[in-house]
Amino acid sequence: MATPLSISEQATRAGAGLIDRLPPEVWEERMRRCRAEMERLEVEALLVYSAGNEVGGYEWVRYFANYVDVAPLWASETWLAIPLEGEPTLFMNWHMVVERARTFSSFTDIRCIDIWSQPQGERHDLIAPALREWLLERGLGSARVGFGHGGRGGRWMPYTPHSVYRVMEDATEGGTLVDASSLLWDITRVKTEYDLGMLRRVAEVNCEGLAAALDVLREGATESDLLAEKIRRAGALGAEIADPEHCQLAVIHAFGPRPFYVTGYRFQRGDMFVVDSGASMGGYESDIARNAIIGPPNEIQRRTYEACMEVARILEDALRPGVVARELWEIKEVEARRLGFDHLATFAGHGVGISKNESPFLAPWDNTVIEENMVVNLEPGLFVPGEACFNYEETYIVRADGPERITPLSSELFVA
């Protein structure tokens, strides 16, 4: 008779589900940066809401507590409480992962708020009392408290439920609540050497995964064939694969509206499309794009590709410390229209780091001054509706003597 197997026991022995702990010096530097910004904001504590998805600010909890939520579930949320002095606390709402979190989080004070035993009520009803109690036990009941929340740059399109604002107001009653939605992005915009090393590695993994996907591309292959090969290769190299957002492969066609992520569509001769690929690893992200065509390109497709690459090289030459993010967008607009294109990507690019899309945004409204050791994606998309669709995306470290490209995959048009 076969011996019963325990998947849970096997996974524990194998270390499945565990992530690497942060080096102590890296975590200490992150907390130092955080507290320096807290001092600038004149707050004595920082309360952070972090949802289980990118626009909900999942980056906060990974960056500070090195915690990966169980899944991007509707009720999967975490809260951080960081005092200006003393030990920080991680609050979560899943009992089953508290002990596992202790093995890889840099926080030692980890608590669970039991939202599941409520017979009635909104899921945030128990959060404010728990955070209020934490403030009182730290002697911060009447203090100025920062409210950290929102992904992809903080104030830019944060996805924070209205009830969370009420939680923070109730928790800090008697004190002063201060907006700190951009704190995480303000302290991570210029990368450390550790950041740069991790971003180089995840960019390499993403390029390897995308190269493997393109290698199976041919007439009759499906979009899902590409995704499966991407996941196989990137996962083997250490990418963290939880959902499409964390091992993204988007196929964007020129012939009209369709789902953004992959489908069972079979490629046909003459198809020309963008393959946008993401990867996550160690709390860092990579976001790149290449272009492919089934069969030789026609004149319009070749001209669009060549124009896109010309604009890309002009942007690359302009990417220097001191240039303003908005100015790079303006360069893309001017050069693309000079070449005869009216349909352009909304951005000229964006920052990348702990999120695939973060500040600075190369957009008409962003006046961020580019600094050395920022990491920026350039993506000068050009489109001829129904005919051609090009949107190369490369990642660069900003250097005084010229940008350092860290995405090694060839930018040549891929012809299957």
Image (tube, rainbow, N blue to C red):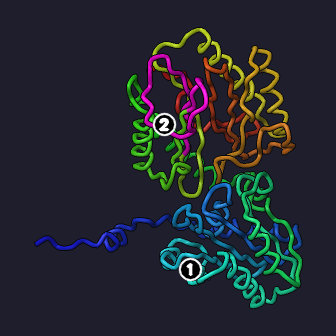
How would you classify the magenta stretch by its main secondary structure?
Answer: loop
Q: Residue at x 65, y 21 (%)?
A: 385
Q: Residue at x 78, y 20 (%)?
A: 335
User: What is the x, y in percent for residue 268?
Assistant: 44, 21
Label 2 belongs to which residue? 210
Closer to the camera in the image, 404 or 328? 328
Is 110 in the magenta?
A: no
Label 1 belongs to which residue? 116
Q: Quadrant of residue 142?
A: bottom right
User: What is the x, y in percent for residue 138?
Assistant: 76, 88
Q: Quadrant of residue 143?
A: bottom right
| In this rendering, position of residue 255 left or right of residue 136 | left
The kind of residue on which mark 2 rests is Leu
Looking at the rendered structure, the secondary structure element under dot 1 is loop
The kind of residue on which mark 1 rests is Trp
Split into 4 quadrants, where in the image is the C terminus?
top left
Whether tag 1 and tag 2 are in contact, CB under 8 A, the answer is: no
User: What is the x, y in percent for residue 303?
Assistant: 64, 13
Q: CA separation, marks 1 and 2?
A: 41 Å
Numbered range of the magenta stretch: 252-278
